[in-house]
Image: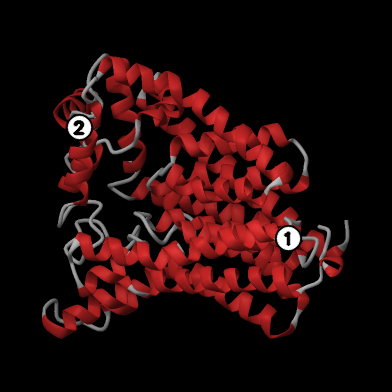
């Protein structure tokens, strides 16, 4: 191992240590910790005990009976825990944890998040290290240090985005491909809104990648079917209750409302989708949803057009996955912890950085800016600076305050997606295939 790879690994290990130690420390200090695991754990416990996981009253009754409802819990936490919004297939993954008491289940869940995320970070570094191991280590270190919310909230995104990265490594390296299929299938089962575009790219890319995508889809269906049948038999009206829970969460002032009146949409763990930007101008779901979809549609069409028209290579795959990972966050509900999908942009960024020139510098600047505005510690610093402005809560000053909290992250993610799509098109249509890196 040369000196560059050793230095890169040291930076990776440093980031890993800070992520674990600081994440555990903050998780122990925050009153609303582990809320996202509670959201998945207690409805699964309801299902095991032959109760309705989509009925808020039944979930809350069990939540209180098992001592989960602490006096320090805010109303929004109770709403989130009792209003289950995941589809039935997610129970495939959560039922094994729900079979355990809260203490062991919580520790095991945290351990899985840590293990998956650190493995994904190492594998992404392995992909990028062939170009610039120290720069790759530094960029991943920065991302790890800014990922504490994954442990504080215990959100499943920490597992899902990690499994996406592991699957991408196995497919691109053409090693342990069936393990990659399993990882991507689990990601689709738990949070298809996070893993869907990554899977779709491999389906569109053709060749061996398409084969892996079809295998993933078949396994996803096979893993989902038992849970779907179980819920369908135990709770025949689950779909209506699920729609009701979604409507309550997305209503104005709800926990998933992207608008200015959101109960939990701004500050740390903010909503990152484009709806949060558009809603500042028009707090109307019909307006901000459709505007977001219309912005996203040409990006997806461009990704599909380029992918179908060109032969997949590793160089193109890194660029396409970078674009797909960022695009995932734009059209539908995602929060700050989902932005750790930026991990999948690092191989493409380091490849461009190693190539030098204005494009390489621009890639590094854009990636760093996206990580700063979505990073847990860096965004906390940004919020403290915004609060020091002492802007009035109403009128134009109130609008500016909301804009400063809302605009930077989604707009920077949009810029990042457009940048990688542009480079993907440029590499695909302007660079002779014989000059491309074979990986």
Task: Single out the residue that lies furthest toward the front.
Answer: 309
Q: Quadrant of residue 285?
A: bottom left
Residue 240: which disc? 2
Counting residues from the start of the chain, the first of labels 1 and 2 encountered is 1
Question: Residue 281: image x %, image y %?
Answer: 22, 75
Q: Is residue 193 visible in this depiction of the protein?
A: yes
- Nearest to the observer: residue 405 or residue 322: 322
Q: Quadrant of residue 63?
A: top left
The residue sitting at 46% across, 66% down in the picture is 298
Q: Secondary structure at mark 2?
A: helix
Residue on which the image places disc 1: 128
Q: Which of the image's four quarters has the N terminus?
A: bottom right
Question: Residue 10: image x %, image y %?
Answer: 72, 59
- Nearest to the observer: residue 270 or residue 333: 333
Q: With respect to residue 33, does 4 lie above or below?
A: below
Q: Which of the image's four quarters has the C terminus?
A: bottom right
Of circles 1 and 2, which is in front?
A: 2
Residue 393: which disc? none
């Amino acid at each position: 191992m040369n000196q560059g790879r050793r230095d890169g690994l040291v930076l990776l290990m440093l980031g890993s240590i800070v992520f674990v130690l600081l994440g555990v420390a903050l998780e122990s200090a925050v009153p609303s910790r582990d809320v996202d695991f509670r959201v998945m754990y207690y409805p699964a416990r309801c299902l095991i005990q032959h109760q309705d996981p989509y009925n808020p009253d039944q979930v809350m009754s069990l939540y209180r009976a098992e001592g989960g409802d602490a006096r320090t819990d805010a109303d929004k936490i109770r709403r989130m825990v009792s209003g289950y919004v995941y589809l039935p297939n997610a129970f495939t993954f959560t039922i094994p944890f729900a079979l355990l008491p809260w203490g062991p289940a919580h520790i095991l869940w945290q351990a899985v998040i840590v293990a998956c995320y650190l493995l994904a970070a190492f594998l992404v570094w392995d992909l990028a290290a062939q170009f610039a191991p120290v720069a790759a280590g530094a960029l991943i270190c920065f991302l790890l240090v800014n990922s504490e919310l994954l442990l504080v909230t215990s959100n499943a995104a920490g597992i899902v985005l990690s499994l996406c990265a592991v699957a991408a490594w196995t497919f691109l390296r053409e090693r342990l491909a069936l393990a990659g299929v399993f990882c991507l299938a689990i990601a689709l089962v738990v949070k298809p809104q996070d893993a869907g575009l990554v899977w779709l790219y491999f389906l569109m890319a053709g060749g061996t990648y398409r084969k892996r995508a079809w295998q993933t889809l078949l396994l996803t269906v096979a893993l989902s079917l038992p849970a779907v049948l179980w819920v369908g038999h135990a709770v025949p009206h689950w779909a209506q209750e699920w729609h009701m829970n979604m409507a309550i969460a997305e209503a104005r002032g709800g926990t998933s409302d992207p608008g200015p009146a959101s109960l939990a949409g701004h500050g740390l763990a903010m909503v990152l989708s484009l709806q949060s930007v558009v809603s500042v101008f028009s707090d109307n779901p019909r307006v901000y949803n459709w505007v977001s979809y219309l912005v996203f549609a040409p990006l997806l069409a461009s990704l599909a057009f380029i992918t179908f028209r060109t032969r997949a290579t590793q160089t193109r795959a890194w660029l396409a996955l970078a674009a797909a990972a960022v695009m995932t966050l734009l059209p539908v509900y995602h929060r700050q912890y989902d932005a750790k999908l930026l991990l999948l942009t690092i191989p493409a960024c380091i490849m461009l950085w190693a190539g030098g020139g204005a494009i390489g510098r621009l890639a590094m600047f854009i990636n760093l800016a996206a990580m700063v505005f979505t990073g847990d510690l860096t965004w906390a610093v940004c919020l403290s600076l915004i609060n020091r402005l002492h802007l009035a809560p109403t009128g134009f000053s109130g609008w500016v305050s909301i804009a400063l909290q809302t605009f930077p992250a989604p707009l920077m993610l949009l810029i990042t997606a457009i940048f990688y799509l542009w480079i993907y098109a440029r590499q695909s249509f302007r660079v002779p295939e014989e000059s491309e890196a074979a990986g």
